[in-house]
């Protein structure tokens, strides 16, 4: 069946696996995607939504690089919102609600259109080795499939264990079996492994809910999109709704605490701090009388509803009784109860910055196997692992993004230098250069690099060049065009900004906090020029952000350049830190384990002090 050797084998068909397989195949590698169930490719295992704070930026970065998550998201969206619009552009974060069935279908359809990508349905139970190098995988039927590189994207399936009250069921997702064999083989080889936990809420019948008792949560009036390509416009949207728990609901939930795997010791692993279960919320925040619940439709043509905020592993009878006491849920019918799941992961400090393992050459890890949580975090890792698996086959240098280039760069760097002992989730606060890493400019930051290595298409590149040229032309217009005080002062007065006494360049007054592009378009000269050039909305937005935040952007660029100088100081991979007596004991231990590629990476390792960095710089002749 598999006489030929593949360039890349991707194990797992979730968000990470789909992006990895698509990237490797689109770049020209002969690729095989092996998954336990071809009917659940690209499955949204938890909430039917993409994006959100920091996560939306990641999806736009994936799209700018030539990944497919943005396109799939746009094609299956049922609602679009730009979050944080009341804050600065660095905080704006796109988010969609999605049709769960269409999302998975779109992934399957797009993947099947990629030449050079094959599919096979079966469980991978182990890897094939030749010395310290990967040679392929072995399936549960004993079939050996050879490959130059392998990407493991096993999600929550490695020895997955589902908890509902006192019941425990082996599985990687409700109704699907767990994957066995891989963890045991890797730990025998010397890999460190651990356990993590995540959870999901009940799914309910929307026909049994009273939406009149809830607060509607509509999408944006002018919905945007994720992809920089011309994906279909969202002409109609479905509302979400919001309701609240109550003291009565909390008391009913507490009745089941003695049977809760969270509290009786059944679950020993750590769950996501920023997405706690409902029982964890009422235990940790006992003073709060209510918690928000978001009622999210699962698609255009289904009555199934996702109860966001009610993630739980309590017994099903407790879940049902408590949820019926929530306003609007008095007659609720369950499709399935919520549950928690424990699964194996491998601390990501065992990876290089390319996501290749340090212990086995040509073996890559991506997604929840690295201790992350979230579709977007997984998809971005899959994209990077797929790209680098292809480049490894071509004997080319790996593709690595810096912290000042992308949230994806922040994510990977955090994982490989700091590791994680709880499910890692991306936040804007994790990025020290978030003014540079906005959702509006991901294409300007990343598409050219992706195009040069053969992933981003020529169409993407031409669209970026057009956007860059046109926004640059508009900014130049503001820099060279002057205004008269009598033209601008009425606008300034209206917004409570100080009037001007003499003429100056439009750029200067546009830089003021309260002045927007809409205000500038009230000036005849600006209105005429914009109409003549027929600037697109994204060009107007890009120009406005660049003008208003030019000072902050230049400052962050300067800080990023300092960081790049440290990244240029490479550390030999075989350096014996034990011989550097001036290093602290903790630094020698951490540096020997993580083996940073450069001084900048070394400086971000917990336990490595500035004085330790000075010792390294002196040793390296710097």
Image (tube, rainbow, N blue to C red):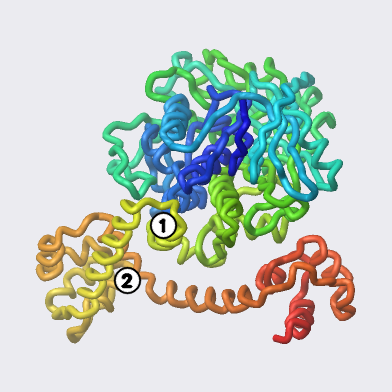
Q: Earlier in the sequence, mark 1 or mark 2?
A: 1
Label 2 element class: helix
The residue that appears at 57% across and 31% down in the rendered structure is 46
* Front in this rendered view, residue 52 or 215: 52
Quarter of the image with the N terminus is top right
Quarter of the image with the C terminus is bottom right
Q: Residues within 10 Å of mark 1 (few under 14, many from 20)?
A: some
- Residue under label 1: 451
* Front in this rendered view, residue 74 or 150: 150
Residue 251: tell me if it is visible: no
Give the distance between the C-alpha atoms of the residues marked 1 and 2, in whole angstroms: 27 Å
The picture places residue 232, in percent across and down from the top left corner, at 29, 37
Left or right side of 195 for 384? left
Label 1 element class: helix
Left or right side of 437 for 120? right
The residue that appears at 70% across and 61% down in the rendered structure is 417
């Amino acid at each position: 069946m598999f006489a030929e050797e593949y360039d890349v084998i991707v194990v797992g068909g979730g968000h990470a696996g789909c992006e990895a397989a698509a990237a490797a195949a689109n770049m020209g590698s002969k690729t095989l995607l092996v998954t336990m169930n071809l009917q659940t490719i690209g499955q949204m295992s938890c909430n039917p939504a993409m994006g959100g704070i920091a996560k939306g930026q990641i999806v736009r970065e994936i799209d700018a690089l030539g990944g497919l998550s943005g396109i799939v998201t746009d094609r299956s969206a049922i609602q679009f919102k730009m979050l944080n619009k009341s804050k600065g552009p660095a905080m704006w974060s796109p988010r969609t609600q999605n049709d769960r069935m269409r999302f998975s279908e779109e992934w399957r359809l797009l993947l099947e259109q990629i030449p050079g990508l094959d599919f096979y349905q079966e469980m991978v139970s182990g890897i094939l080795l030749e010395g310290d190098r990967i040679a392929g995988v072995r399936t549960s039927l004993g079939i050996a499939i050879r490959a130059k590189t392998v990407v493991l994207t096993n999600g929550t399936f490695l020895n997955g264990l589902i908890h509902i009250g006192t019941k425990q069921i082996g599985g990687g997702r409700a109704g699907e079996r767990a994957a066995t064999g891989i963890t045991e083989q890797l730990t025998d080889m010397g890999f460190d492994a651990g356990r993590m936990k995540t959870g999901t809420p009940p799914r309910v019948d929307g026909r049994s809910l009273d939406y009149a008792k809830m607060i509607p949560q509509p999408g944006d009036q002018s919905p945007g999109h994720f992809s920089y390509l011309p994906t279909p416009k969202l002409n109609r949207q479905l509302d979400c709704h919001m309701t609240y728990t109550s003291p009565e609901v909390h008391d009913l939930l507490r009745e089941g605490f003695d049977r809760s795997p969270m509290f009786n010791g059944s679950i020993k692993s750590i769950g996501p701090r920023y997405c706690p279960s409902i029982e964890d919320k009422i235990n940790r925040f006992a003073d709060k009388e209510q918690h928000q619940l978001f009622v999210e439709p699962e698609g255009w043509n289904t009555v199934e509803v996702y109860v966001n905020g009610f993630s739980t592993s309590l017994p099903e009878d407790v879940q049902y009784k408590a949820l019926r006491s929530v306003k609007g849920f008095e007659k609720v019918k369950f499709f399935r109860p919520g549950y928690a799941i424990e699964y194996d992961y491998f601390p990501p400090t065992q990876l290089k910055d390319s996501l290749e393992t340090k212990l086995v050459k040509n073996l890559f890890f991506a997604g929840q196997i690295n201790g992350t949580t979230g579709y977007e975090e997984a998809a971005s890792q899959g994209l990077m692992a797929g790209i680098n698996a292809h480049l490894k086959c071509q004997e080319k240098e790996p593709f690595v993004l810096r912290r000042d280039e992308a949230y994806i760069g922040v994510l990977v760097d955090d994982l490989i230098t700091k590791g994680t002992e709880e499910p890692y989730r991306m936040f804007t606060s994790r990025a020290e250069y978030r003014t540079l890493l906005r959702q509006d400019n991901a294409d300007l930051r990343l598409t050219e690099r992706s195009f040069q290595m053969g992933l981003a298409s020529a169409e993407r590149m031409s669209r970026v060049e057009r956007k860059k040229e046109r926004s640059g032309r508009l900014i130049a217009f503001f820099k060279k065009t002057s205004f008269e005080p009598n033209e601008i002062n009425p606008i300034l007065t209206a917004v409570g900004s100080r009037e001007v006494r003499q003429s100056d360049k439009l750029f200067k007054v546009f830089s003021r906090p309260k002045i927007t592009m809409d205000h500038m378009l009230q000036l005849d000269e600006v209105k005429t020029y914009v109409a003549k050039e027929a600037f697109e909305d994204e060009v107007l937005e890009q120009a406005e952000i660049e003008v208003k935040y030019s000072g902050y952007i230049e400052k962050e660029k300067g800080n990023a350049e300092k960081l790049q100088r440290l990244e240029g100081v490479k550390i030999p991979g075989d350096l014996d830190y034990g011989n550097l007596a001036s290093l602290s004991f903790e630094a020698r231990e951490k540096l020997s384990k993580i083996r940073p590629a450069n001084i900048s990476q070394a400086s971000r390792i917990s336990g490595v002090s500035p004085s330790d960095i000075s010792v390294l710089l002196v040793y390296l002749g710097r």
